[in-house]
Image (cartoon, helix red, strand yellow):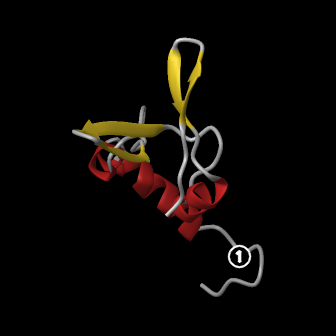
Amino acid sequence: MSTTRLRQQGGAVVLTIPSDVANMAGWVVGMKLDIDAFGESVCIKPTKRVARGRKSLSELLSGIDENEIKALNSQLDNSDPIGHEII
């Protein structure tokens, strides 16, 4: 167990996390952390990343044009081998 002190920096109260504790937790400088207070205890954990602009698998699959895939497959099936592939 490590010990640290709270200190004042500008208008904020700052808690310094010892390097060995940060390393054991897998934390790096610049990482965003969530902090919750429970009475006299504090829980600090990494912020869960919120995916933005990402699509689910079903959303990706719904955008596929079935006729376009069939046309692409027929073009590939009728072409000559280029490398060492076996057809």
- Above or below, comparing residue 21 to residue 8 in the picture: below
Q: Tell me where residue 14 appears, x and y as whole percent.
A: 54, 29
Q: Quadrant of residue 22?
A: bottom right
- In front: 8, or 42? 8
Q: Residue furthest top?
A: 11
What amino acid type is highlighted by mark number 1?
A: Pro
Q: Residue at x 41, y 57 (%)?
A: 70
Residue 11 is left or right of residue 66, and the answer is right
Residue 50 visible to an observer of this rendering: no
- Above or below, comparing residue 62 to residue 1 in the picture: above
Residue 53 is left or right of residue 15, and the answer is left
Q: According to the image, label 1 marks what residue?
A: 81
Q: Tell me where residue 38 appears, x and y as whole percent.
A: 23, 41
Q: Residue at x 56, y 59 (%)?
A: 21
For the residue carrying disc 1, how many other residues have a C-alpha within 10 Å: few (<14), some (14-19), or many (20+)?
A: few
Q: Residue at x 52, y 60 (%)?
A: 25
Q: Quadrant of residue 87?
A: bottom right
Q: Tell me where residue 1 appears, x and y as whole percent.
A: 49, 64
Residue 22 visible to an observer of this rendering: yes
- Above or below, comparing residue 45 to residue 15 in the picture: below
Q: Secondary structure at mark 1?
A: loop
